[in-house]
Amino acid sequence: MSTEIMKVKEQIVSDYAEKLAKAKSFVIVDYRGLTVAEDTQLRKELRENNVEYSVVKNRLTLRAMEKAGFAGLDQVLTGPTAVAISYDDAVAPAKVLVTNAKKNNKLEVKGGMVEGKILSVNEINGVASIPAKPVLVAQLLGMLQTPIRGLAVALSEIAKKQEA
């Protein structure tokens, strides 16, 4: 192999390792059997959720993951492999990919990483069931407002009784 090709591959590994190191999460999938239309729709959904989706050779992906500090994924890097990376929403790649895997039975989730922890397929499925961040924030605010509203009503009633 020429030194020029080696330099290109080293650069690909280095760039990819940098992306993986910055990621909040990534999910590894086998995309075998997807039609062009299904793949296009999947990529569209991932883009809408700010998830970067790419296909990189398994050997280069493995080297990049090891360089980024994510060891133990070599057993899932077999066959056609794509990686979905999110830099801001740790749940987004899992949610989109697991939903699509259930919808068309062709996409197979192999594993991934969330917040620095390597996860199995079952754990990725669990992460996918977590509500989106805006939903969680809304639920938290709702839970916080209920006791405050109750306190305000109680104080209002006390003030009315004292005036009477």
Image (spheres, rainbow, N blue to C red):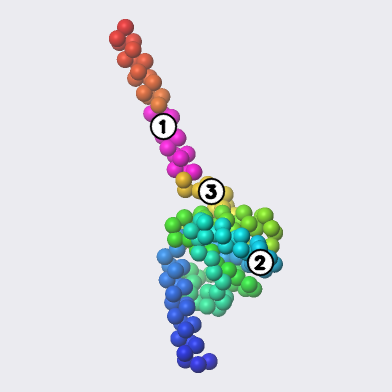
Q: What residue lies at 51% left-to-right and 56% top-to-bottom?
A: 49
Task: Please give left or right for residue 71 compared with residue 76 in the image.
Answer: left
Q: Secondary structure at mark 3?
A: loop
User: Of residues 103 and 112, which is closer to you in this image?
Assistant: 103
Instruction: Residue 119 in the image: state x and y as whole percent.
Output: 54, 60
Mark 1 is surrounded, within 10 Å at the Cα level, by few (under 14), some (14 to 19) or many (20 or more) other residues, namely few
Relative to residue 84, is residue 150 depicted above or below? above
| Separation of residues labelled 1 and 3 (CA atoms) | 22 Å
User: What residue did someone put label 3 on?
Assistant: 130
Relative to residue 155, is residue 60 depicted above or below? below
User: What residue did someone put label 1 on?
Assistant: 145
User: Of residues 158 and 95, which is closer to you in this image?
Assistant: 95
Residue contact at pointers 1 and 3, CB within 8 angstroms? no
Mark 3 against mark 2, which lies toward the viewer? 2
At label 2, the amino acid type is Val
Q: Which residues are magenta?
A: 135-148
Task: Please give left or right for residue 4 compared with residue 97 in the image.
Answer: left
Mark carried by residue 33: none
User: Of residues 109 and 73, which is closer to you in this image?
Assistant: 109
Magenta region includes residue 137:
yes
At label 3, the amino acid type is Ile
Instruction: Residue 40 in the image: state x and y as whole percent.
Output: 61, 63
Mark 2 is surrounded, within 10 Å at the Cα level, by few (under 14), some (14 to 19) or many (20 or more) other residues, namely few
